[in-house]
Each structure stands twice: as structure tokens, then as C-alpha cells.
Image: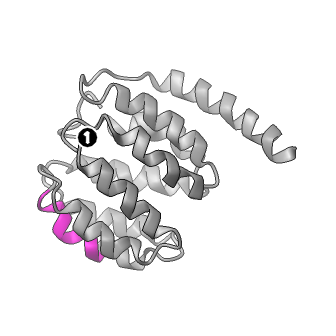
């Protein structure tokens, strides 16, 4: 997050988290190439296309993300294109709702963990996503780096709790 404008640091921060995704390794790979041109966004569409191929209904995503990448600095168009994108998601209606609230504070991002809370329950490991993203967003405005080692420890800890929760 220290280099959010260029995004080169983003894959390293997201690295431990992506292992909680069923296809997280692909996410890390394409996001790495994506973040290399994060400021311009032209490569974003290409790499997201490869990533969304691992989604069951991800074929629509690159098309709706195309106009969004040209207004990344403001993000006002994000909600509009995500609306069409999320229509192909099984739980897209909830995503749209929380993203609408989130985008209202897109410049600061402080509202992100709160609005993502109901959405994350549609993730198999959504509650872990909320916790990790909460830590990330806490340093979003200041740009302080959350150590990947800390994230790794937290993820291992909560993965263990999740295992016991599922067992019960």
C-alpha cells in the first residue's frame, strides 16, 4: 500500500492472503503483471481476463472492467461497471450493495471493512478476508505497510480457527 499509485508492492502484501483463495495462485500471478501498469490500467483488462477464467461466471468481468480502467484515478465509474459484472455472480446483488457504500468513501477507504462485512460471508473464507482487509485498510490513508510476515501469521492462525469451526 506504500506504493498504491504504482502498485508494485501490492502483490507482495496480497501474497499470503491469496493462498486462502481456491485459485489464489493465479490471482497473485495476474495481479503482479496488472500492478506493473496500475497507473495506466491498460494491462489490467488483459490480466483480469486470465484471472477471471478461473471464475465460474467470470467471462463478463473483463468487458465491464474495460471502461473502469480508464477512470481509475477517480473510481466513480467503478460502481457502474461492477453492476453489470456482478449480475453474473451468484451473490452479486449483495456485492453491489456493499460496493456502493464503499465507493461513497473511495477516496479515504475507511468504510471498506464495514461494508465488506456482509459480503464476505458469501466467501468460503470470507471472514478471514474481512479481517485481513480490515488491517490493510487501516493503513490505507497513511500508506503504512503491514508486514507480510504479520499477515502470514494472522492467516495461519485464523485458518486454524476456521478448520476447528468447520469441524464443529
* Res. 134 image quadrant: top left
Query: x, y percentage for residue 111?
Result: 33, 39
Query: x, y percentage for residue 50?
Result: 40, 68
According to the image, label 1 marks what residue?
7
Q: Observer-nearest residue: 168 or 132?
A: 168
Q: Dot 1: within a 10 Å radius of its alpha carbon, few (fewer than 14), some, or many (20 or more) residues?
A: many
Query: What secondary structure do most residues of the magenta stretch adopt?
Result: helix
Query: Does 112 sit left or right of 128 as displayed?
Result: left
* Res. 95 image quadrant: bottom left
* Residue at the image position 49 percent from the left and 45 percent from the top: 117
* Res. 141 image quadrant: top left
Q: Which residues are magenta?
A: 63-71
Q: Which quarter of the figure is the N terminus placed in?
A: top left
Query: Does 20 sit left or right of 63 as displayed?
Result: right
User: Relative to 143, does residue 83 appear above or below in the rendering?
Assistant: below
* Residue at the image position 44 percent from the left and 21 percent from the top: 147
Secondary structure type for disc 1: loop
* Residue at the image position 16 percent from the left and 54 percent from the top: 72
Q: Which quarter of the figure is the C terminus placed in?
A: top right
Image colouring: one colour
Q: Observer-nearest residue: 146 or 115?
A: 115
Magenta-span inclusion, residue 25: no
* Residue at the image position 12 percent from the left and 62 percent from the top: 70
Amino acid at each position: 500500500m506504500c506504493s498504491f499509485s504504482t502498485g508494485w508492492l501490492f502483490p507482495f502484501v496480497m501474497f499470503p492472503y491469496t493462498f486462502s483463495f481456491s485459485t489464489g495462485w493465479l490471482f497473485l500471478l495476474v495481479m503482479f503483471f496488472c500492478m506493473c501498469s496500475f497507473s495506466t490500467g491498460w494491462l489490467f483488462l488483459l490480466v483480469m481476463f486470465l484471472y477471471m477464467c478461473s471464475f465460474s461466471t467470470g467471462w463478463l468481468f473483463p468487458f465491464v472492467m474495460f471502461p473502469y480502467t480508464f477512470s481509475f484515478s477517480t473510481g466513480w465509474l467503478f460502481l457502474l461497471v461492477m453492476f453489470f459484472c456482478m449480475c453474473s455472480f451468484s451473490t452479486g446483488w449483495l456485492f453491489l450493495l456493499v460496493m456502493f457504500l464503499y465507493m461513497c468513501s473511495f477516496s479515504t477507504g475507511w468504510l471498506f471493512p464495514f461494508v465488506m462485512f456482509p459480503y464476505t460471508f458469501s466467501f468460503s473464507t470470507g471472514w478471514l478476508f474481512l479481517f485481513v482487509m480490515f488491517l490493510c485498510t487501516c493503513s490505507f490513508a497513511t500508506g503504512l505497510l503491514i508486514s507480510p510476515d504479520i499477515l502470514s501469521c494472522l492467516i495461519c492462525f485464523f485458518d486454524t480457527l476456521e478448520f476447528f469451526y468447520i469441524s464443529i
